[in-house]
Amino acid sequence: MALLISWRPSSASNISFPFIVKKTSYSKSAKMGSFSTNNISCSVTSSSASIMVAQRKLPILLFDVMDTIVRDPFYHDVPAFFRMSMKELLESKHPTSWIEFEKGLISEEELTRKFFKDGRSFDMEGLKNCMKRGYSYLEGVEGLLNSLKENGYEIHAFTNYPIWYQMIEDELKLSNYLSWTFCSCIFGKRKPDPDFYLEVVKHLNVKASNCIFVDDRMGNVEAAIELGLKGLQFKNADLLQKDLSLLGVDISTNESQDLIECSS
């Protein structure tokens, strides 16, 4: 008998499990349009399964992306792009089109047609360029992610975002530190839908209590905690590092270890 763990990450995924990994490419076609991703199957024989599971470093870290790792241009730059205040933009845009786009229910072309309530036209390529220019790591977060990676933690994006997550990857290469595993546009679900959290835990094949979820929105964190995950609200990188340390996450680096050894 073999143990089979199936995943549905994106093409930018960088899975670093102690399992034997086999990648096979396929095309996923959805209403948001066709894009390539990888179907990653991890298989081990039953005789070695318990040993390999034991080698998997816990806890598993799940990170929201926008305004947790990456600056969100929608709130900072997009109103100015449309020459509106945020209030005017929120009043003018279609109430559900962006949510549908995030869930992969509509394509970019459909979003262009229904972004505004009145159906007015706008420069979609200009909007995308505005978003790309606005993406940047929040202060201190990239260094924290690098420390977590150096310490062998398994890190996944768990984000409400459309297919444009690929633009973030192109600009910032988040896959250097985490896997784009759990995106709303792939799963058709959004936080804080409990089913999305449950599907994440199912795919990871671990107990919910072995996951730490980080998000800037308290409502999303509370939803995680209610389902048995450990949850942390992101405020800034320094506070997050302290909160993770309190939960037993090792964030020491080789450099800091060398300093400790030199001073002892």
Image (cartoon, rainbow, N blue to C red):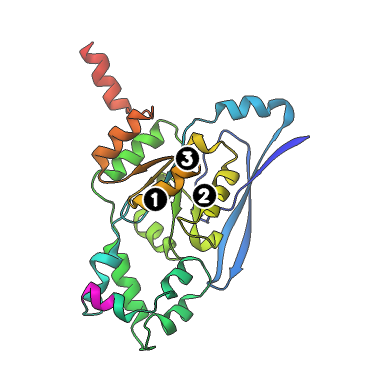
Q: What kind of element bears circle 3?
A: loop
Cα distance in 3D space between marks 2 and 3: 9 Å
- The Cα atoms of the two marked residues, 3 and 1, are separated by 23 Å
Does the magenta stretch mainly form a helix, a strand or a loop?
Answer: helix
Q: Are marks 2 and 1 in contact (CB under 8 Å)?
A: no
The residue wearing badge 2 is 197
Where's residue 96, x and y in %? 43, 74
Foreground: disc 3 or disc 1: 3
- Tell which circle, 3 or 1, labels the residue nearer the N-terminal end: 1
- 252 shown above or below 183: above
Dot 3 amino acid type: Leu
Question: Which residue is identified by label 3?
Answer: 229
Residue carrying label 1: 174
Can you give x and y, in whole percent of width and height, for residue 50 in the image? Answer: 65, 26
Q: Left or right: 51 with respect to 63?
A: right
Q: Residue at x 50, y 50 (%)?
A: 13
- How far apart are the two marked residues, 2 and 1, measured between alpha carbons? 21 Å
In magenta, the rendered stretch is 85-89
Rendered position, 19 above or below 197: above
Sequence-earlier tag: 2 or 3: 2
The front one of 192 and 199 is 192
Which amino acid, mark 1?
Answer: Leu
